């Protein structure tokens, strides 16, 4: 099924009268928002991660923690 078929298969109206509001709501849910790095930063972080045999998220978090500590020290 391609995208064109999916659009034509949709009904003009749907009945949500039996729907349950908030069924999947979780007030304690947390969201991981995507962070997009510039290409040269991403390449650098990949190189560092590969050298340290870890993932990019760990490296980026380490860099950010280090920067936060520096900023806090000069306040």
Image: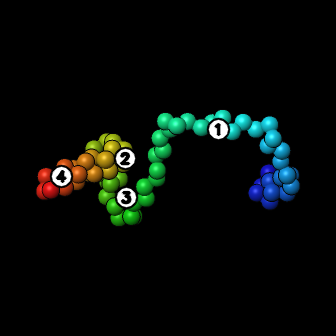
Q: Which residue is mark 1?
A: 22
Structure colour scheme: rainbow
Q: Which residue is mark 2?
A: 57
Picture disc at residue 72? 4
**Residue 19 at what x, y percent from top left?**
76, 38
Q: Counting residues from the N terminus, which is met first, the one under dot 3 or under dot 1?
A: 1
Label 3 neighbour load within 10 Å: few <14, some 14-19, many 20+? some
Spatial separation of the CA atoms under disc 3 and disc 4: 26 Å
Q: Which residue is mark 3?
A: 42
Q: Nearer the observer, disc 3 or disc 1?
A: 1
Q: Nearer the observer, disc 4 or disc 1?
A: 1
**Residue 48 at what x, y percent from top left?**
29, 51
Q: Counting residues from the N terminus, which is met first, the one under dot 4 or under dot 1?
A: 1
Spatial separation of the CA atoms under disc 2 and disc 1: 32 Å
Q: Counting residues from the N terminus, which is met first, the one under dot 2 or under dot 1?
A: 1
Q: Which residue is at 31% across, 47% downward?
A: 61
Q: Which residue is at 83% across, 44% downward?
A: 15
**Residue 46 at what x, y percent from top left?**
35, 53
């Amino acid at each position: 099924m391609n995208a064109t078929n999916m659009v034509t298969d949709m009904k003009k109206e749907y009945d949500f009268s039996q729907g349950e509001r908030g069924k999947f709501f979780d007030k304690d849910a947390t969201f991981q928002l995507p962070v997009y790095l510039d290409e040269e930063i991403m390449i650098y972080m990949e190189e560092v991660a590969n050298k340290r045999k870890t993932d990019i998220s760990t490296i980026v978090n380490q860099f950010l923690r280090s920067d936060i500590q520096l900023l806090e020290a000069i306040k």
